[in-house]
Amino acid sequence: MTHGDAADLRLLTDTAAEIFLAAEGQPLDGGWRPVREAGLDLLAVPEPLGGGWLQAAAEMTRVAGDTAVALPYADTALVAKPLLAHAGLVVPDGPCAAAAGTLVAEPADGKLRVRGTLRRVPWGAAAGRIVAVAAAVDGDVLLALDPSRASVSPGVNLAGEPRETVAVDTVAELGVDAASLPAGGAVVLRRGALARSLLIAGAASAVLRATSRYALERVQFGRPIAKQQAVQHALAEIAAETEAVRAASAAAVEVCASDGFGSAAAETAIAVAKIQAGTSAEVVARLAHQVHGAIGTTREHPLHRHTLRLWSWRDEYGPERHWARSLGEAALAAGPWELVTR
């Protein structure tokens, strides 16, 4: 389907929440199986392979951030698989990874010799394919890399999620595991930035709920700390930042769905969403830990599962500085008034 009504989206959201919560503590294969069986990883993939419903995939990504699920849903459903389908490359059944770095490709006997190193690749070792971009003589090329044909070094981000270093020195065959990328390598970065903005929106919502609940339950001097004006101000600021990142990321999804990720409007909307997400992540995490006190930093308390992800995700696919520069350059090129009104 190319679109769906509110009831369809609500059903998908409830299904995703159940699947993601049930994946807690399971190995990757076990946690991913119901995602694949429900078709949640193909929602943003064009017909006839998937659903062609970007808004639904975006909402599932937000739910993934809300539940802090240890699955590469965002990179698979919003970045890797739609790009593979658009390029006419094989879309694997399992999870995929996406890399923001750029490799180098040189002609070699009718094929491409691909070299370079991709750093901090999310779930790279466990991916069926790693989607990356290589700079070639005739323009950027989209690659579907098999991690078994690369040297993968383990690593994790602040939240403990896999972030591997992938050293590539392989031959890619055009039409099989490589395809031209007319929109340029920026489309991978844009999709990844939107995915991180949506994840942050979901995690911020979870932090808001947890912090509000704790403030009502924690009694000090005979009354809940939620009655204290300073705590009320903190909760109000967390709520405002949560809504700001939700609105910015939702607006970016709408623009990308209507104009495409390669458009100038999409670049602006994604830049705004990622800047807002990074700013909100800092405020939400800081104030939530202030309200929780020392208990929120302990491994036994669940708050860190979301706040550590907030701090990690804000720097992936470009921190605020990168996207602020992108906005500034666009404003200088087109004029500030044209930028804000297009």
Image (cartoon, rainbow, N blue to C red):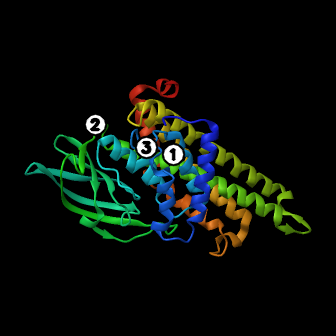
Quarter of the figure with residue 332: top left
At which x and y percent is residue 221?
Answer: 90, 69
Per the model, the C-alpha gap separating discs 3 and 1 is 11 Å
Query: Which mark lies nearer to you, 2 or 3?
Result: 3
Callout 2: SS? loop
Q: Residues within 10 Å of mark 1 (few under 14, many from 20)?
A: many
Camera-side residue of 292 and 192: 192
**Kind of residue sitting beneath label 2:** Pro
Q: Which residue is mark 1?
A: 57
Q: Residues within 10 Å of mark 2 (few under 14, many from 20)?
A: few
Camera-side residue of 277 and 68: 68
Q: Which residue is mark 2?
A: 182
Question: Viewed as shown, does residue 299 lie left or right of 80?
Answer: right
Q: Which residue is mark 3?
A: 50
Q: Residue at x 79, y 61 (%)?
A: 215
At which x and y percent is residue 13?
Answer: 61, 49
At which x and y percent is residue 235?
Answer: 74, 53
Question: Viewed as shown, does residue 51 lie left or right of 173?
Answer: right
**Kind of residue sitting beneath label 3:** Gly
**Kind of residue sitting beneath label 1:** Ala
Q: Residue at x 67, y 58 (%)?
A: 207
Mark earlier in primary sequence (2, 3) = 3
For the question of whether residue 219 can be seen, the reply is yes
Callout 1: SS? helix
- In the picture, the disc for residue 68 is none
> Is the residue under label 2 in contact with that under label 1 (CB below 8 Å)?
no
Callout 3: SS? loop
Quarter of the figure with residue 82: top left
Camera-side residue of 267 and 74: 74
